Structures are given as C-alpha cells and as structure tokens.
Amino acid sequence: LPEFSPKARQDIKHIWLISLKSEVLRKEMDDYIRANPEILILLVRGYTKDDSMVQTYGDILRFSIKHEAMFYMILFSPLSWQFFNFVTAEEYAKSADAFKTFKIMLTRNNGYHRKHVAGFLKKNFTKFFGKFRELLTDDRYHVKRQALRLLSDVLQAKANFSIMVKYISQPSNLELMIKHLCQNDNQKKGIKSEAFHVFKFFVANPRKPECIVEVLAKNKTKLISTLEEMEKDGSDYGQELPLLIKRLKQLPAK
C-alpha cells in the first residue's frame, strides 16, 4: 500500500472488501489468508505507518476481522497484544482508529465472535486486564475515556459474565473506578460518566466479596455525595443512579 497513490489505495481497499463480501470468493479468500498469514501481519502493522494510510489499513482490517478465520488468527496471536501500543499512539488519528478496531475485535455482537473473545479473556485474564489497567491510568483524556467505555462494553457482554464477576471481585479494580468517579475536575466530566458505567457493576453485584464491601463501605460517604451531585447535573443515568445510591446507603458505615 505505501507504494501506491491515495486513489489506488482506495481502489485496493474496495477490491478487498468486495472480495470478502462475495459469496463466491469468501471461502477462497479465507483459504488464501490461512495459507498466507503474513497479510494479516501487514494489515495490523498498518498502525505503524504514516497517518495518511492509517484509515485505509484500519478499514480493511475491521472488515477482515468480521470473518471468523481471520479474526481467530489475529486474536489468538501476538498481533492482538500490539493494539495496546497502537491505542496509545501519540498521533490522535492512529489512536482513535486503533480503538475503533480494538472495540470491534472485543465486542462485535456475533455468536462465534463472542465465543472466541470469552475464551481469549478467560485464558489471558491477568495479562489482558493488567495491560488494560495501563490504558485506564494513561494521562491522556481520550485514551482513558475510550478505555473506560470499552471496558464497560466488554464487561456487560453476556458471554463474558464469568470474566465480569472475576473483574468486579478485585478491590484494586474498584478502587481505580472510585478514583475516576470521584475526581472533581469539571473538564473530565466524560471520565466520570464512563467510570460510572463500570462502577455500577461492583455495587449491583448481589454476591459481593467481603473485600469489595469493605472498600465500598470505606468510601460510602464520598460515593453517595458524588452520585447525588451527578443526579443533579442533568445527565441521564436512568434508574441506575438512584438505585446505586440506595444500595450504598444500605452498607454499614466504616
């Protein structure tokens, strides 16, 4: 792709997409990629190329991972871990496009897709969420906010129920969400909002481990105050926010 003009790159992208959409060519394309996996490596490494080519690589890659064979080959290979570097790229265009692809990889609503993601997360829970924590503590607003939104989407997927339960049973994860939720910087209101949609899983869990109850109880006053302020700011959290406030008020004081 780098050797072609912008127009030629677009033509190549459309030929690729049409080939993958074709009922006649789909199996041949899957077989070809299986036999030539270096093509997927080149596509993923498109995020290391010049900004002007990132979207073209990203568009081709996002369409490719809708196909089970290609998706599986990327997810269960070292390629998937490279996205933790791509989403933290200094160039905003690269970071935003990589997050878009990472989100499709982890949350696409398709039977085989959900099954493979759940299997991947179970197998790599510690490594995956360790790396994800680095995104959640990144200094850049857009990285942190996109990571919080993606985390919420991953945890709420039904196929990931056991992963969600394991995640919300760890006090360090709750403490990080409380930090994001209770920060007072008005310019980071989006962080607070996204953190709420992860924090709610901890409070709503009917089988909270004692260690989680202790952290919630310890921060009870601060959390209730924060949520009551959020209730007044005009944002629509539906019935979830008052329900969480009620649950927190029922906790024993520490």
Image: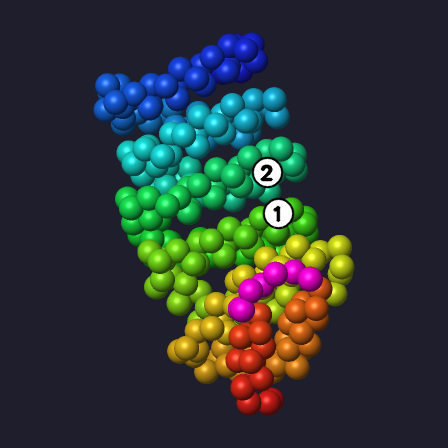
The residue nearer to you, when weighing 78 against 149, is 149
Q: Position of residue 65 (x, y in %)?
A: 38, 34
The residue nearer to you, when weighing 237 against 88, is 237
To which residue does mark 2 refer?
95
Kind of residue indicated by mark 2: Ser
Q: In the rendered view of the protein, which quadrant contains the C terminus? A: bottom right
Marking on residue 161: none
Give the answer, above or below, for where 251 lies relative to 148. Answer: below
Q: Are marks 1 and 2 in contact (CB under 8 Å)?
A: yes
What distance separates the C-alpha of mark 1 from that of mark 2? 8 Å
To which residue does mark 1 refer?
143
Query: Which of the 4 image quadrants contains residue 231?
Result: bottom right
Q: Residue at left 50%, top 14%?
A: 9
Secondary structure at badge 2 equals helix
Q: Main secondary structure of the magenta part?
A: loop
Q: Is residue 142 visible?
A: yes
First in sequence: mark 1 vs mark 2: 2
Q: Position of residue 55 (x, y in %)?
A: 54, 27
Kind of residue indicated by mark 1: Val
Q: Residue at left 65%, top 60%?
A: 235
Q: Which residues are magenta?
A: 234-240
Secondary structure at badge 1 equals helix
Badge 1 crowding class, 10 Å Cα cut-off, few under 14, some 14 to 19, many 20 or more, is many
Q: Position of residue 96 (x, y in %)?
A: 59, 38
Q: Is residue 116 visible?
A: no
Q: Position of residue 33 (x, y in %)?
A: 30, 25
Query: Which of the 4 image quadrants contains residue 160?
Result: bottom left
